[in-house]
Structures are given as structure tokens and as C-alpha cells.
Amino acid sequence: MIRQGKRRPQAMRKVTITPDVMKYAEGSCLIEVGNTRVVCTASCEEKVPLFLRGKGSGWVTAEYGMLPRSCRTRIMREASAGKVSGRTQEIQRLIGRSLRAVVDMERLGERTIWIDCDVLQADGGTRTASITGSFVALAQAVHNLQKAGKIETFPVRKLVAAVSVGMVQGIPMLDLDYEEDSGAEVDMNVVMTSGGEFVELQGTAEKHPFTQKQLQALTSLAKKGIVQLIKLQKKVLKDIIVLS
């Protein structure tokens, strides 16, 4: 199989992260993974959900949405439909879990950081791009909290990023675009920290189950991609954060 742009199976698409794209947000970036483009923003709110009040702990949560013409045909705004789809809820929760895995909530204090991911253009991997970009926005926001004297210690323990992998025509492939994803025998999203730990694995087979050997091949391939993404995050955040 010849991939678009003659990419090798183990190669990522071109990834660009542009920080500070939104004037009013405490943290923001535009992440571009091939033709997928997502704006990620972080907003600080000086309160926490009811279940955390008085406990000295903060919270990080996320919202996700796709613009009507982010896809090849127009999709209805969920506000017009009057409800959030199950897919959107799943992705929002995934982004929130991924970020909370690397944040010390006690150091954050009793405040909430809202992450908003708006998909401008979708060509596969919008949820993984959202996680990778959201970490950059989050790190900027907590850095600004520290500069303002609102927190004493930087609460981010490690970096976190995500990538898609899959079996396409029997071949393990990294960073699937839409065409590859829609025809994959196995589709998997992998979230990992800069310490090499897994935060989440979302893997699904179509038509035929996959083996443990294939699972190991896919997770090893994902790790290679995530190492590249974390290297890029560190470069973008070089004046803010230095972590292992």
C-alpha cells in the first residue's frame, strides 16, 4: 500500500504546533497533523466542581467540537441538535483523563482549567491531535498561574501526547489519516506520558480479531510516534517547562 505523500508505514505526518494563537486564553496553540488542524485553548476558573469544594484540590476538564465544514460534507452543530453526541462525550472525557494523569491537583489548588478543542479541519486523528495540543495549552496556563503568584509549584509532573496506529492491509501503520483509518482492520489510539507510561489504549478490530503479537507491534510503533511528539512539545515549551 502506498500512503499519501509516499509515507513509510512507520512515519508520522508532518506535525506543527504554533503556540499563543488566541489572544484572551491563558494558554493556546494550533496543532496541525497533516491536514488535521485543531485549536486548543486553556482557560483558568477560580472554582472547582461541587464534589471537590473545600478539599484543596483542582480539576482539569475538556470540551471538544468540530466545525461544520471541518469534514468533507457539512456536519450539524451539536448546539443546533440540542445535545452532545456520544462520540463527542467520549473524546472530551479522554482528553480530560489524559491531562489529569500528569497534573498534581493539590498543587493546582482549588481552581479548574478548562480545555477547549475546536477541530478546524479533520483528516483522521482529531482526538489524538487534541490531546497533544491540549497539553501545550495546559502547560502555558499553569505557567501563567505560577508567574501571577497564584500557585507556588509547577503542578505538571510529566508531558503527555497521543497518536493513532492501526493495521492496514495487514501492515502496522503509524498516524492514520482518514482514508487509512476508515479501511483499517485494527484502529487504535494510544496516550502515553514522557515517562513511557500508558494513560489509555483504545483499540478496536474490524472483521477479524488481532493477536497479542500485533498488539505489541502497534504499541511499540505508537511509542515511537509519541516520542517524536513529546520532543516537539518540549521544543515549543522550552521556556516554560523542563521535564524528563
Image: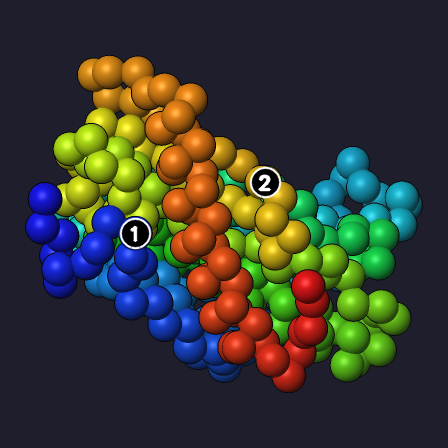
Give the class, few, some or many, for how many residues have Cα within 10 Å of label 2's Cα (few <14, many ≥20): some
Q: Which of the two residues, 95 or 64, is positioned nearer the viewer here?
A: 95
Furthest residue toward front: 213
Residue position for label 1: 10
Q: Residue at x 58, y 40 (%)?
A: 198
Q: Secondary structure at mark 1?
A: loop
Task: Name the quadrant containing residue 120.
Answer: bottom left
At label 1, counting other C-alpha atoms closer than 10 Å, the crowd grade (few under 14, some 14-19, many 20 or more) is some
Circle 2 — which element?
strand
Q: Amino acid at mark 2?
A: Val
Q: Please, is residue 229 above or below residue 190 in the view?
A: below
Q: Amino acid at mark 1?
A: Gln
Q: Nearer the viewer, residue 72 or 190?
A: 190
| Residue at the spot of label 2 | 199
**Which mark, residue 167?**
none
Residue beneath the point at 22% across and 62% down: 35
Q: Quadrant of residue 51?
A: top right
Question: Residue sitting at 68 percent across and 74 percent down?
Answer: 241
Gap in Å between the C-alphas at discs 1 and 2? 22 Å
Precedes in sequence: disc 1 or disc 2? 1
Q: What is the x, y in percent for residue 33?
A: 31, 62
Q: Quadrant of the C terminus?
A: bottom right
Q: What quarter of the picture does the N terminus occupy? A: top left
Q: Position of residue 37 (x, y in %)?
A: 31, 63
